[in-house]
Image: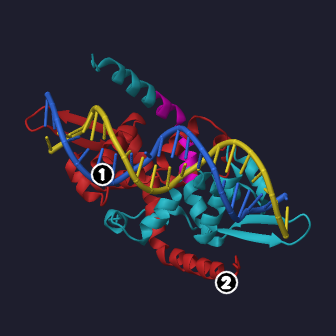
Chain colours: A cyan, B red, C blue, D yellow
DNA sequence: CGGGATCCTAACCGATACTG
DNA sequence: CAGTATCGGTTAGGATCCCG
C-alpha cells in the first residue's frame, strides 16, 4: 500500500532544500495561512467544490485571499479548476492527482496538530509564565 | 512501528481545524517561511546545535528571524533551549520529544516536495504559458 | 456567482547599531 | 557568541466597489 512512509527514509533532506532552490518554492507556497486549510477542505469533500461553498467552509477567509490561494495551488498543479459557462457562472475546484498525494501528508499534519492540542497549549502557558518572572526592565 | 500512518485515519479532520480554534494557532506557526526549515535542520542534526551553526545552515535567514523563529518554536514546546553561562556564551537548541514527533511529519513533507520537484516545475511552466495566451487588456 | 481592480493600513522583515 | 533595540521600506491582506 502506498503510504507516506515512502518519504520517511533517513537520507539527508536538509541539504536538498535548505538552500535556495526550486524545492523552496513549494515550501514557500505551503508556508501559508490558508493553503493547508484549503487543501484540507478539498480533500475532505468527495466531489468538486464551488467557490462560495469553499468560502463558507473556511471560517474567516476573504474572497480575495481564497481566489489568490486557489490560483497559487492551481499553478503548482495541486488543484484543478473547472469553469462551466452557465448563467450564473459555476466554477468547481478539486484536487489533482498530485494534490491528493500531497494532501495525504498535510492531512497527517493536521491530525497530529489536533491530537496534540493540549500538549501545545500547556507548553504555551508554561512558557508565558516563565517569561513573566524574569524581566526587570525598570 | 510508530509511523505517521497513525494520523492517516479517515475521520473528518476539517471540522476540527477549519474554524478558529487552538489548533489553528499551531497551524499558523507552521505556516511560516522558516519554521519548517528550522525544524528540518534540528531534526537532521544528531545533537544540540548552537545558534550560529544553525544560522549558517539556513541560507538567507537573518539573525533576527532565526531568534524569532526559535522563540516561537520554544513557546510551542517543540524546541528546547539550553543556555550555558560561559564566556563567550553558548546556547544550544534541540528538538523536544514533541518536536521530534512533529518533525517526522514535516520531514515527510520535505521529502515529498523534493521528490516531486519536476512535476511541480512543469505544472508552473504550463500554467504560465496558458496564462500568457488569454489576456487582451488593451 | 465568481471573481477583478483599488485603496489603504498593519505587520513583517531586513539592515544597522549596541550589549552582557 | 548570542542576542536586544530601533528604524524604515515593502508587502500582505482586509474592505469596498464593480462587472460579465
Q: Residue at x 64, y 37 (%)?
A: B20
Q: In the picture, which quadrant includes the C terminus of chain A? A: top left
Work out whether residue A102 or residue A134 is closer to the camera in this orientation and state it. Answer: A134
Where's residue B89, x and y in %? 13, 37
Work out whether residue D2 or residue A39 is closer to the camera in this orientation and state it. Answer: D2
Where's residue B56, x and y in %? 23, 57
Task: Return the residue at label 2.
Answer: B133
> Residue A121 lies in magenta, yes or no?
yes
Residue furthest toward the right?
A87
Q: Is residue A81 visible?
A: yes
Quarter of the image where one finds residue A89:
bottom right
Residue at mark 2: chain: B
Q: What secondary structure do most residues of the magenta stretch adopt?
A: helix
**Apparent side of residue A23 relative to residue C2 in the rendered image (left or right):** left
Quarter of the image where one finds residue A97:
bottom right
Q: Residue at x 39, y 41 (%)?
A: B73
Task: Name the element at disc 1.
Answer: loop
Task: Name the element at disc 2.
Answer: helix
Q: Is residue B78 visible?
A: no
Q: Which mark is residue B62?
A: 1
Disc 1 + disc 2, Cβ < 8 Å = no
Q: In the picture, which quadrant includes the N terminus of chain A? A: bottom right
Where's residue B58, x and y in %? 30, 57
The answer to whether residue A6 is above or below residue A42 is: below
Mark 1 vs mark 2: tell me if same chain.
yes
Work out whether residue A41 or residue A118 is closer to the camera in this orientation and state it. Answer: A41
**What's drawn in magenta, residue-wise?**
A107-122
Q: Earlier in the sequence, mark 1 or mark 2?
A: 1
Amino acid at each position: 500500500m502506498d503510504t507516506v512512509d515512502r518519504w520517511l527514509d533517513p537520507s539527508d533532506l536538509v541539504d536538498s532544500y535548505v538552500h535556495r532552490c526550486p524545492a523552496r518554492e513549494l515550501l514557500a507556497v505551503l508556508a501559508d495561512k490558508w493553503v493547508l486549510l484549503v487543501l484540507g477542505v478539498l480533500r475532505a469533500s468527495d466531489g468538486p467544490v464551488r467557490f462560495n461553498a469553499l468560502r463558507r467552509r473556511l471560517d474567516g477567509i476573504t474572497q480575495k485571499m481564497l481566489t489568490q490561494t486557489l490560483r497559487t495551488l492551481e499553478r503548482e498543479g495541486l488543484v484543478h479548476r473547472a469553469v462551466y459557462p452557465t448563467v450564473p457562472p459555476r466554477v468547481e475546484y478539486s484536487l489533482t492527482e498530485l494534490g491528493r498525494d500531497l494532501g495525504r501528508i498535510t492531512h497527517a499534519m493536521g491530525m497530529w496538530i489536533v491530537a496534540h492540542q493540549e500538549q501545545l497549549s500547556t507548553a504555551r502557558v508554561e512558557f508565558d509564565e516563565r517569561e513573566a518572572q524574569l524581566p526587570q526592565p525598570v
